[in-house]
Image (cartoon, rainbow, N blue to C red):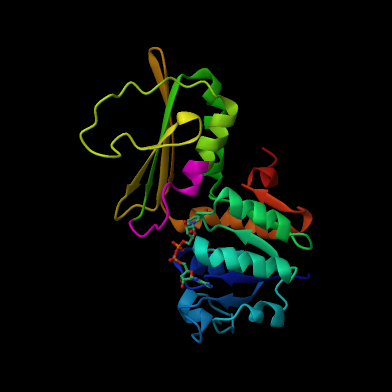
Amino acid sequence: MTRIKVGVFGAGGRMGSTVCQAVAADPSLELVAGVDTHHSGLELSRVAGVTGVDVQVSGDPQTFVDRGAEVVIDFTDATAARENLVWLARNSIHAVVGTTGFTEGDLDSFRKEFTTSNCVIAPNFAIGAILMMRFAEMAAPYFDTAEIIELHHDNKLDAPSGTARLTAERMAAASGEWGDDPTTNTVYDGVRGGIGPAGIRLHSVRMRGMVAHQEVILGTTGQTLTIRHDSIDRTSFMPGVILATKMIASRPGVTIGLDPFLDL
Ligand code: NAD
């Protein structure tokens, strides 16, 4: 069996090392290279806790070309990933991207760059989170008010989370008719959260001990609906990352979100 050759940007990070372990454990994938600016020169086995892989972490993406990577997975940060993705596109390597914090302008520029290879950018690879977004979008037209509360670990750099943003965008696209906020006096700045698409409010909680969690609360006369998803471990994202890695070669252009890969 020919295995897909896979590289990882951010191989030494919290997500990147979990991704390295998942790729190394999959019989149809081969982990050929890891790039991480802060762990360059170290053994990938030590940095990412993978066994049976004889690869040194590099600080130079050229290693992906040298080792024949067909797909590269990126879990870094938005500033680094902006460069990484352009580099991958220009080297005709498929990209599976979990990094969050991109602007609409970034997505437009990625769409222009990925002409000879493909790219999927998913702010959340957990199946439960993908269903949560779908359910929230389905519920939106039946409710008058909605707010999104996302809760993450205290090392997260961007706010709101990519998942919260995408949820709000999809709910706003499903319904533009939301009740006005009645608040006229606030004691603390920002206490009512940030105002997202169609006026849907988003609240970002950063808390030691958390991983990635989100609640979508919808309300109408006499009833509320709460849709909640919890990722309690980073392995929750791995089936989605592995699925995207296997399917990306057959999805031309830039795909946002994992839904098209799941036939939802
Ligand atoms: P982290 O800080 O633990 O890891 C990031 C790693 O990237 C670090 O090891 C860092 O050294 C490395 N890095 C930085 N710049 C680099 C560059 N130019 N080239 C190569 N490596 C570079 O962060 P994390 O918790 O692993 O999160 C990474 C990203 O993944 C964040 O944007 C986070 O929001 C996102 N995330 C997405 C999902 C999802 O399902 N899509 C789930 C969890 C986290």
Q: Nearer the viewer, residue 143 or 232?
A: 143
User: How far from the left and from the top, in percent, is residue 169?
Assistant: 55, 37
Query: Where residue 9 appears, x then y in whole percent?
Result: 57, 70
Q: Position of residue 204 (x, y in %)?
A: 36, 44
Please tell me whether residue 150 is drawn above or below residue 94 in the rendered image: above
> Which residue is farthest left?
187
Residue 73's image quarter?
A: bottom right
Q: Residue at x 51, y 87 (%)?
A: 41
Left or right: 79 in relation to 72: left
Residue at 37% across / 23% down in the picture? 181
The boundaries of the magenta stretch are: 154-165
Quadrant housing the N terminus: bottom right
Q: Residue furthest bottom?
A: 41
Query: Was residue 156 drawn as part of the magenta stretch in this picture?
Result: yes
Identify which residue is drawn at 63% across, 72% down: 7
- For the question of whether residue 114 can be seen, the reply is yes
Is 48 magenta? The answer is no
Pick the front one: 199 or 66: 199
Q: Depth check: give the residue in front, 112 or 208.
A: 112
Kindly identify the residue that appears in the image at 70 percent across and 40 percent down: 263
